[in-house]
Image: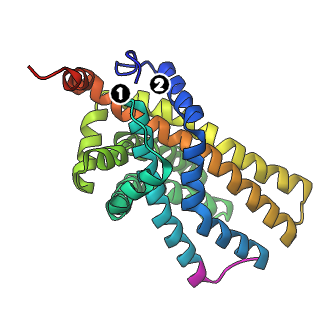
Amino acid sequence: MTDNLLRPLGAGELLDQAFGLFRRLFVPLVLIQVIASAIPFLLNLYTAARGGASPGLTFTMYLIAFVFGSLASAATAYLISESYLGRDLTAGDALRRALPRVWAVMLLSLGLGLVVVLAALPALLAIGAGAAFAGLGVQGQAQVSPAMGASLVLVGIVLLALPIAAFSALAISTPALVLEGISPGVALSRSWSLTRGYRLRTIGLLFVVMLVVLVPVLAIGGMGRAFSPEPTSGSIVLITTLSGLVSLVVTPILYCVLTLLYYDMRVRKEAFDLEMLAAQLPAA
């Protein structure tokens, strides 16, 4: 750990440090993703080659991906944290350390998802009602329906700020849970407290990272549809393979940003930098 890392970082500095960690830890980060994503990736290829999957197989695939994704997020948090604090950790050791925390991370993800869905309900209801009123207007059953429908849709769009705000407030709950060994409920509360006052900044950082992570994957899908307007099983397998490989490479960037954001909030609010400095001083 260099002397200038544990200090409050500007948004640009935090992103620069995150990408620096990503470059330095590229091999172990991708190795964790490969190990955790191998089975879900092969199942995706299998269903793509078959042209689809049964509801039972689809549920099984999502469940397996959820379990292994939780393992990957915990292991990655350990790996990034140790490197950021100047200690070494291999991908294998990170995965072994993460195994006992998988169920806690899964429960946390479910809780976080529930909070975001509940926060999104008003927006979804408003947009749905607006679409319904607009449909009535198109059918000529109510003259005021189109205007009312448009107004409700606009209100719904504005209300989408609620789930975005909720997610930004809870964004660092996974690093908190993994690195502090706390329960899912406490981790959500911890993230809520640490991000208070910095949520707009968090939204901006996450927006930039999501662009970096999603654009390459979406671009592959778009190019696949452009070159193959009528998808064949071969083209679907190829697009699935390329998307999966790109996702393996870029997903750790999000984990790097979230882990550094967690430490940045602790430095700002809890003087974590001074705590670490004190821990390094020789005993009297």
- Under circle 2, the secondary element is helix
**Which residue bears the numbered disc 2?**
14
**Which residue bears the numbered disc 1?**
264
Which residue is nearer to you in this view: 275 or 267? 275
Q: Is residue 280 visible?
A: yes
Instruction: Please give the name of the residue rendered at 39% of the width and 38% of the height, measured from the top-left corner.
Output: 81
Residue 138 location (% of width, % of height) = 68, 60
Work out whether mark 1 precedes mark 2 in sequence or the reverse, and give the earlier one. Answer: 2
Which residue is nearer to you in this view: 127 or 161? 161
Instruction: Please give the name of the residue rendered at 44% of the width and 39% of the height, measured from the top-left corner.
Output: 80
Q: How is the image coloured?
A: rainbow
C-alpha distance separating marks 1 and 2: 8 Å
Q: Quadrant of the N terminus?
A: top left
Q: Looking at the image, which residue sits at the far top? A: 4
Instruction: Please give the name of the residue rendered at 36% of the width and 58% of the height, measured from the top-left corner.
Output: 105
Residue 75 shown in magenta: no
Residue 53 shown in magenta: yes
Q: Is residue 142 visible?
A: no
Q: Quadrant of the C terminus?
A: top left
Q: Is residue 131 above or below residue 201?
A: below
Q: Is residue 22 above or below residue 112?
A: above
Residue 172 location (% of width, % of height) = 36, 41
Asked whether, in this view, residue 66 is left or right of residue 277, the answer is: right
Asked whether, in this view, residue 250 is left or right of residue 183, the answer is: right
Residue 6 location (% of width, % of height) = 35, 22
Q: Amino acid at mark 1?
A: Asp
Residue 17 location (% of width, % of height) = 50, 25
- Under circle 1, the secondary element is helix
Q: Amino acid at mark 2?
A: Leu
The boundaries of the magenta stretch are 51-57
Numbered-mark total:
2
Q: Are marks 1 and 2 in contact (CB under 8 Å)?
A: yes
